Amino acid sequence: MFLLIDGFWASGKSILKSLLDGHPKLKVSPGQEAVFSAFARNKKLLKKLSYKDLSIIRKILSDSYYYDLERYHLNNHSTVDWKFYVKLNFYQFETYWTKKISELKNWNAIKIIEIIHTSLIKNFYNITYYEANKSLKVFMEDNNFESHFFYLKNFKDSKLILISRDFGDVIASMINRKKNNNIYHTDKFDEINNFNYLIYKKFLGFKNENNKIIAKTLKKKFPGRVYICDFDKLIFNTEDEMRKICKFLKIKFNKILLKNTHFGKLTKRNDKKQILGKKIFEKKKHLSSAQIKLLNIIENKEEQITLVSYISFIILKCKYLIYKIFTNVNNRIKRL
């Protein structure tokens, strides 16, 4: 059984993951792989799996964070997030799952995904494949809401938790993100940490609204398998929220769920507002009133709207619609 955690960037996925990490009934992955979504995005390649060629699987995995797991190899503390003791022999893990897949009579995406994820848990926790397979395994995605239809449809016993956070606070957190010299995909943080780029160039406000629509659709389409976790409740009313999550997962509440753990060890900081050494950034402290008003209009929040904010919204909405039309046409051309 799988549990997938997802949410918009800077929505608090890693916070929930760290709270779940210590529960004895859960086996939590050491990284953020986003492998489920990589398979969902590469449907054309899935048709080629019948050739039983590992290079096809590797091409799909290269579209995820799978190879980031290599950083945990041989307990290399200089490249491990949060400087925690991690024991994952990446090459042993990779050899194991490739051998197991090569023994399959017929290759299909679902079985391959199951083997990769179960093998990761087996090797990380040093347990048998059977034990790993029977465990409730926790993995984390990276703002890939469209892929969850594929995930929930094909993995019948799976569950999904989506983190919901005030979008202004999300943007405030994103513009305060710092590059980590040990993680190559954080290089872009130095380029994107400004409001105009995120809102006027990347249209993240509208993408966030699309995510909300997808989340509601998923919850309706897959009843009992999708839980929407409110970030503020998770931080400021942790016990109540974690009890609800336990009920959703059908596991017994444990006090360890109130503490931040990583790789089975307590973090030095157990103040969730300072989790992993990161501050929780709030929009009121980092965004101007005009910026907040614009985000409120995008989110359809009832608030006094200024003419300037409304005009900015109309212009931005038109740019977004043009962007969507261009993107759709471009995608259709690629499919031909």
Image (spheres, grey):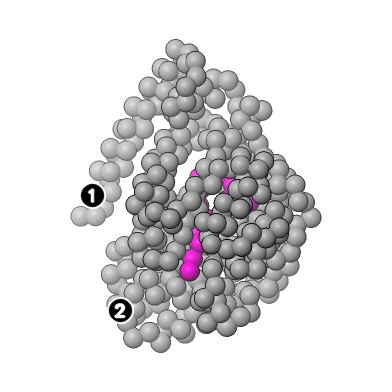
Name the residue carrying label 1.
333
The image position of residue 145, as x and y in percent, is 42, 50
Q: Is residue 23 above or below residue 185?
A: below
The image position of residue 165, as x and y in percent, is 55, 40
Give the class, few, some or many, for how many residues have Cα within 10 Å of label 1's Cα (few <14, many ≥20): few
Residue at image coords 72%, 55%: 259
Marks 1,2: beta carbons within 8 A:
no
Numbered mark located on residue 51 in the image = 2
Looking at the image, residue 95 sits to the left or right of residue 181; the answer is left
Residue at image coords 43%, 20%: 312
Q: Does 11 lie within the magenta span?
A: yes
Residue at image coords 64%, 33%: 282
Helix, strand or loop for disc 1? helix
Which callout, 1 or 2, points at the residue further toward the start of the chain?
A: 2
Helix, strand or loop for disc 2? helix
Looking at the image, how many numbered discs can be counted on the residues?
Answer: 2
| Residue 181 can be seen, yes or no | no
Looking at the image, residue 101 sits to the left or right of residue 12; the answer is left
Q: Type of residue at label 1?
A: Ile
Residue bounds of the magenta highlight: 1-15
